[in-house]
Image: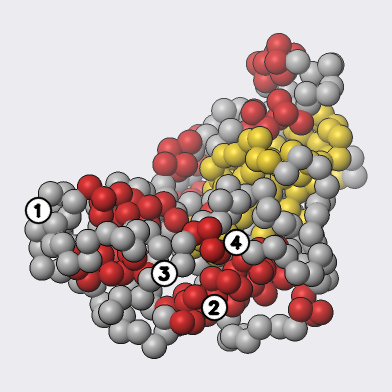
Amino acid sequence: MLCVPVSYGDWMELKKNPQINENYYRLKKALDYYESLETRSWPVLSAFNFKKGAAYPEIPELRERLRLTGDLPASSDAQSEVYDNALWQSVRSFQWRHGLKPDGVIGLRTQRELNVSPFERAEEIRRNMQRWAALPPTLGKRFIFINIPEYRLDLIEDGKSVLHMKIIVGKPDRPTPELSSVITRAELNPYWNIPPEIAKKDILPKILKDPHYLEEMNIKVVQHRKSQVLEVNSTNIDWQGAYKNGFAYEFRQEPGENNSLGLVKFDFSNSYSIYMHDTPAKELFDRDNRTFSSGCIRLEKPFVLLSYLLQDNPQWNLQRIAETLQSGKLTIIKTKPFPIYIIYATAWIDRQGILHFRSDPYGYNEDPNPNDYPEESLLSSPFSMPLSFYA
């Protein structure tokens, strides 16, 4: 006899403690459900080359799996072996909830997610409950929210997302940190002052392979002396020695379309020296897994965000922005302080009561801390936000 899953709406629950984010309680409802599945048989589904409209003996197992995950209605025909339109749509629903391309084609990534056991899901939900329980119930009327595993930025106004875009975050060995801060300025035609670690790991090896690399990338060797920036003749530098023994200077990429920061940069105070910026590598936004940066956040639509931040500043209209970009000169624009929150959540429930999961690019769900913290100890996180607006 098949277990009848709860409907998406049943994930919803009113928050019991006004000091704890409501996603904690919503996920608790999901946790209860997945714990109830832990004693069920959960065989590995391995046959996935299904063509729409064709019949396969493995289809009934797929139907049962999708009913248990809530993607296929309990009233559907449990024994049908046909990969019909209703089942195809259910696969697409499952893919969308897991951040996969919703094409109804069961590839390796969809297969992997379908085979995650109820025990593993329950553990993932517990860890994310800990994260959500640490969040304050409100963050004001307007703020920017970034969820690293979702590769997405939302700009929230009056509880609703009025702007969203894809983002690129740090590589697993150079992760984007969780934090809260305030955006205070934007830079048009920014310089990229290359951090020493990136200079050593990335730039110096490229110079050794290609003597013309600095010229091709419009990167200067500079030295700071008080308030002055002095350019150094790179042809006089022993690059082999610099790579082995250390580099006494700094690299700075000049403004321009090929600058790694693109044409605009957004600054906010933090101890990690990260920021948000444009990028010339637009093609990377078409990837599903977008961990390509050294920790900073690359924006799909940076000028839409800039326009929003400057909408109350009549001195900076689109014409002036365009003229400034055309000039190629660094220009700093102060903005009204705008809160930004960067968090790491691989499980949440949206405003429609739909449970979402994402992959764990940094492996944080594998940290050896399986037990829930007491609620009282989870209310002091510096990087926190509610997802009651999240859709």
Q: Which residue is located at x 55 percent, y 64 percent?
A: 11
Q: State the SS at label 1.
A: loop
Q: Are marks 3 and 4 in contact (CB under 8 Å)?
A: no
Circle 1 is placed at which residue position? 54
Give the alpha-carbon distance from disc 3 to disc 1, as whole Å.
26 Å
Q: Which residue is located at x 73 percent, y 44 percent?
A: 159
Residue sitting farthest toward the right: 226
Q: Is residue 248 among the parts visible in the rendering?
A: no
Q: Nearer the viewer, mark 3 or mark 2?
A: 3
Q: Measured from the top left, where is residue 128 in percent x and y? A: 61, 71
Q: State the SS at label 2.
A: helix
- Disc on the earlier residue, 3 or 2: 3
Q: Measured from the top left, where is residue 276 in percent x and y? A: 67, 44
- Disc on the earlier residue, 4 or 2: 4
Give the alpha-carbon distance from disc 3 to disc 4, as whole Å.
14 Å
Circle 4 is placed at which residue position? 12
Q: Of 229 and 338, which appears nearest the observer?
A: 338
Q: Of 27 and 288, which appears nearest the observer?
A: 27
Q: Which residue is located at x 69 percent, y 63 percent?
A: 14
For residue 58, which quarter of the picture? bottom left
Give the alpha-carbon distance from disc 3 to disc 2, as whole Å.
12 Å
Circle 3 is placed at which residue position? 5
Q: Nearer the viewer, mark 3 or mark 1?
A: 3
- Disc on the earlier residue, 2 or 1: 2
Give the alpha-carbon distance from disc 4 to disc 2, as whole Å.
13 Å
